[in-house]
Image (cartoon, rainbow, N blue to C red):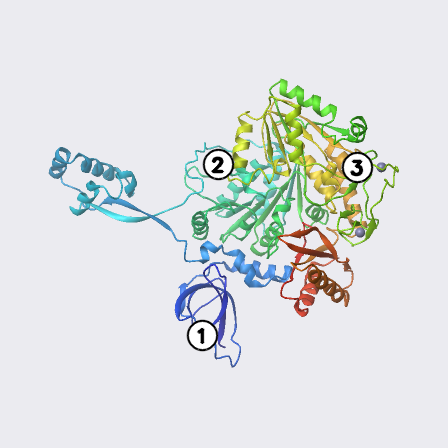
């Protein structure tokens, strides 16, 4: 049967063309091939191989294979097929995501440097003459004779050096091109560490992973360890166990720029003899990415540390995947294929029979529910590794402060202000946390704390200015904006308010003479801004660090004894059914930043709803209590983990056309709606306009993910959309617009 291949052409255009495959050429998806393109030779990557359409003689033949081995392993190809069937993403889009552009293209290549080595050693006599007449040449020969490998000419006086030229002309030395690695962390000195002695809980966790490593049918393991319980040490020793068995390891971190400490700890443990670690994340240069990827593929690197896309690392003999902070939304990819890296880790576990360790102090409800269903194994660590106690957490009622401060934006309660003063006097440091998530505006009453919610969905309604309406982002329900609080009849009800920028201005006025630094997406646009600020904070050049969720996790500063949460309601009343979960996670993570050294820590949470369960459970470090009541709510309102959820979004520079397209799709989705699927009404997105495009969205929920994605794909494939409207769907969406 004649075959054809869809080839992704190298270059920025990302064109895909079909070519016939010459008989007998072993072309597989992932192979690099040479093809004719507009009568010129070009190269590309095979995305798909299919039967050649009969009677199609127009197809040109591809010329040859560049490399007989495909760039993706057979196991990864199975993963790609799984992604296609689950998320409904075309296979070619998936393969594109698997192979970085720097690998596909011809532009990036291995970097080389001129180096010298001894060709023919000079005789004693010749050496003696050289020592007298040509001291430079003599010194070079001495250096090269003592070296075990070629020395870059840069270290021998440079390529223009007359001495090198003379030596090479006389035939004493040879100049060659040496492949050099672009090491993203070159020049960093790291002091090696030895494994620590584990406490009982850590030892039990390690044993569970060890068993899993040799199991024929390993179940994923959830390591639920409180902040400071020493999860990283378990990761390190589990990694060692896998290496000892001759297997390789992938470690996923939610945001690698925020986790330099974790990367350094791995390097300190494993890079002592040779360089076994490769890193993969978006902050690498094209060249670094190319080199690191090739080190993975060649088997030179045995430990991969990376952000979500590292789940596609073409690593053979995979023994263990560690997903740190498994609950983090950063594991969900925003662009197609919109995969969830933690979920793919579990799929790779099934496909490649490797162990999977999901770690978190605040596991996601999806993962935790899987332990209740006995699909995952649960291991708990309930003690801080260094014997420290969890910080004391106080909740301050901002309704009282608002009355005291007479309606002005009460940013600091008296209690928090006094606590900050005390710390500054003792030269201790303070972290202030303010989760400001942009545009979504919910309505809350400062005097009584009441927030207006949708009766059907238990999430706050969001104010849409253009229609002067309150809208539910789950079901589409609309309501008029009340003039007074429905609860206490106070007319002071208004939108939640201030962000980090305003808070910084006020803090600077209140704490004159102290250095305050702000960390959010605005202040960290400059490269290394985040790293520099954290370094200054560590060096105690900054007294108060104010930031968004960016500073909530991973940071470990022993001198921080006070953490203040300026407005816990901002995340709690976001229009998202996960708001309670996120608030609980954030508060727990933020609290974990206090008292990590010998000094005791204190946490102060400011809120207008002090009795809200998420806040109370976080305050008492009660994960089980939180999960029990949250799962009940999710079940009652048919939210994940009891359903899967898909977000359908239409965007266009033509408002009417985007809206009309989504309304048409809504009608079609409604026909033959699969059983158990709940279809929401189309609404303007919370982010109504972005990049001068109008956005409309609707939500679907259903018990079965594949049924949901198939139904959506069927309707999308059968419904022509106007050219200037883009429709996307996101299964298991985290960001609800
Ligand atoms: Zn009220
Ligand atoms: Zn609703």
Between residue 582 and residue 21, name the one nearer to us.
582
Rendered location of residue 282, percent (x, y) = 52, 47
Look at the numbered disc 3 and say if its residue's Cβ is closer than 8 Å to ligand 1: no
Alpha-carbon neighbours of circle 3 within 10 Å: few (<14), some, or many (≥20)? Answer: few
In the image, farthest residue toward the top = 425
Q: Is residue 339 left or right of residue 371?
A: left
**Local SS, label 1:** loop
Q: Quadrant of residue 488?
A: top right
Which of pointers 1 and 2 lies earlier in the amino acid sequence? 1
Question: CB of mark 1 within 8 Å of CB of mark 2?
Answer: no
Label placed on residue 60? 1
Between 41 and 248, which is closer to the camera in this rendering?
41
Measuring from the top left, give residue 493's x and y in whole percent: 82, 38
Q: Which residue is mark 2?
A: 269
Residue 379 falls in image quadrant: top right
Q: Is residue 534 left or right of residue 601?
A: left
First-in-chain label (3 vs 2)? 2
For the residues labelled 1 and 2, the Cα–Cα distance comes to 53 Å
Rounded to the nearest angstrom, the CA distance separating label 3 from label 1 is 66 Å
The residue nearer to you, when weighing 557 against 469, is 469
Label 2: how many residues lie within 10 Å, few (<14), some (14-19) or many (20+)? Answer: some
At 39% from the left and 53% from the top, the residue drawn is 109
Question: Which comes sooner in the sequence, label 3 or label 1?
Answer: 1
- Does the image show residue 707? no
Query: Marks 3 and 2: CB-CB under 8 Å?
Result: no
Which percent across, then down, holds residue 310?
Answer: 53, 49
Pair 3/2: label in front: 3
Residue 165 left/right relative to 115: left
Q: Secondary structure at mark 2?
A: helix
Q: Give the Cα distance between marks 3 and 2.
A: 43 Å
Q: Residue at x 43, y 65 (%)?
A: 33
Label disc, if present, on residue 612 of the rendered structure: 3
């Amino acid at each position: 049967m004649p075959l054809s291949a869809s080839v992704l052409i190298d270059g920025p255009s990302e064109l895909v063309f079909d070519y016939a495959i010459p008989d007998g050429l072993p072309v597989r998806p992932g192979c690099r091939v040479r093809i004719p393109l507009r009568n010129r030779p070009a190269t590309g990557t095979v995305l798909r191989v299919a039967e050649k359409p009969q009677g199609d003689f127009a197809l040109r033949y591809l010329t040859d294979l560049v490399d007989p081995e495909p760039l993706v392993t057979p196991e990864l190809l199975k993963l790609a097929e799984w992604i296609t069937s689950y998320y409904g993403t075309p296979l070619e889009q998936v393969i594109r995501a698997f192979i970085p552009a720097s690998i596909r293209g011809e532009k990036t290549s291995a970097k080389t440097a001129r180096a010298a080595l001894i060709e023919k050693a000079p005789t004693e006599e010749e050496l003696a003459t050289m020592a007298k007449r040509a001291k430079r040449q003599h010194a070079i020969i001495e250096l090269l004779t003592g070296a075990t490998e070629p020395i870059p000419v840069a270290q021998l006086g440079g390529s223009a050096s007359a001495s090198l030229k003379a030596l090479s002309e006389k035939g004493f030395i040879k100049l060659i091109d040496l492949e050099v690695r672009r090491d993203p962390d070159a020049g960093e000195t790291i002091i090696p560490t030895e494994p620590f002695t584990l406490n009982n809980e850590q030892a039990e966790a390690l044993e569970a992973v060890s068993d899993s490593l040799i199991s024929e049918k390993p179940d994923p393991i959830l390591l639920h360890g409180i902040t400071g319980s020493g999860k990283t040490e378990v990761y390190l020793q589990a990694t060692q166990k896998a290496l000892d068995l001759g297997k390789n390891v992938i470690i996923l971190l939610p945001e690698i720029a925020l986790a330099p400490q974790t990367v350094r700890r791995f390097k300190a443990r494993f890079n002592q003899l040779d360089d076994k670690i490769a890193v993969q994340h978006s902050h690498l240069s094209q060249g670094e990415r190319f080199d690191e990827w090739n080190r993975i593929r060649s088997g030179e690197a045995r430990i991969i540390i990376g952000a979500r896309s590292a789940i596609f690392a073409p690593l053979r003999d995979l023994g263990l995947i560690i997903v740190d902070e498994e609950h983090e939304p950063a594991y969900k990819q925003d662009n197609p294929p919109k995969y969830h890296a933690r979920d793919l880790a579990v799929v790779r576990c099934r496909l490649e029979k490797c162990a999977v360790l999901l770690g978190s102090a605040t596991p996601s409800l999806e993962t935790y529910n899987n332990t209740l269903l006995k699909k995952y194994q649960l291991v708990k660590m309930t003690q801080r590794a260094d014997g420290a106690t969890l910080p004391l957490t106080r909740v301050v009622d901002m309704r009282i402060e608002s009355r005291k401060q007479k309606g002005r934006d009460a940013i600091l309660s008296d209690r928090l202000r006094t606590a900050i003063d005390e710390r500054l006097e003792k030269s201790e440091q303070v972290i202030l946390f303010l989760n400001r998530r942009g545009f979504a505006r919910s309505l809350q009453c400062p005097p009584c704390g009441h927030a207006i919610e949708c009766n059907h969905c238990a999430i706050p309604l969001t104010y849409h200015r253009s229609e002067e309406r309150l809208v539910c982002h789950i079901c589409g329900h609309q309501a008029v904006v009340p003039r007074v609080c429905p609860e206490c009849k106070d007319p002071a009800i208004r939108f939640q308010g201030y962000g980090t920028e305003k808070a910084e201005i006020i803090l600077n006025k209140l704490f004159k003479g102290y250095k305050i630094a702000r960390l959010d997406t605005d202040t960290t646009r400059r490269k290394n801004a985040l790293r520099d600020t954290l370094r200054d904070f560590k060096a105690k050049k900054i007294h108060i660090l104010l930031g968004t969720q960016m500073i909530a996790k991973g940071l470990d500063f022993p001198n921080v004894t006070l953490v203040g949460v300026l407005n816990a309601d901002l995340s709690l009343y976001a229009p998202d059914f996960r708001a309670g979960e996120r608030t609980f996670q954030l508060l727990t993570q933020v609290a974990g930043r206090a008292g990590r050294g010998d000094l005791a820590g204190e946490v102060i949470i400011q809120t207008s709803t002090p009795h809200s369960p998420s806040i109370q459970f976080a305050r008492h470090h009660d994960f089980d209590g939180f999960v029990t009541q949250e799962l009940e709510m999710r079940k009652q309102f048919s939210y994940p983990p009891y359903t899967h959820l898909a977000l359908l979004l239409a965007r266009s520079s033509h408002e009417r056309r985007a809206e009309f397209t989504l309304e048409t799709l809504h009608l079609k989705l409604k026909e033959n709606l699969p059983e158990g699927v709940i279809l929401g009404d189309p609404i303007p997105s919370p982010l109504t306009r972005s990049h001068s495009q109008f956005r409309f969205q609707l939500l679907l929920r259903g018990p079965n993910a594949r049924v949901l994605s198939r139904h959506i794909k069927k309707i999308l494939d059968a419904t022509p959309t106007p050219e200037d409207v883009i429709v996307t769907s996101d299964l298991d969406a985290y960001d609800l617009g």
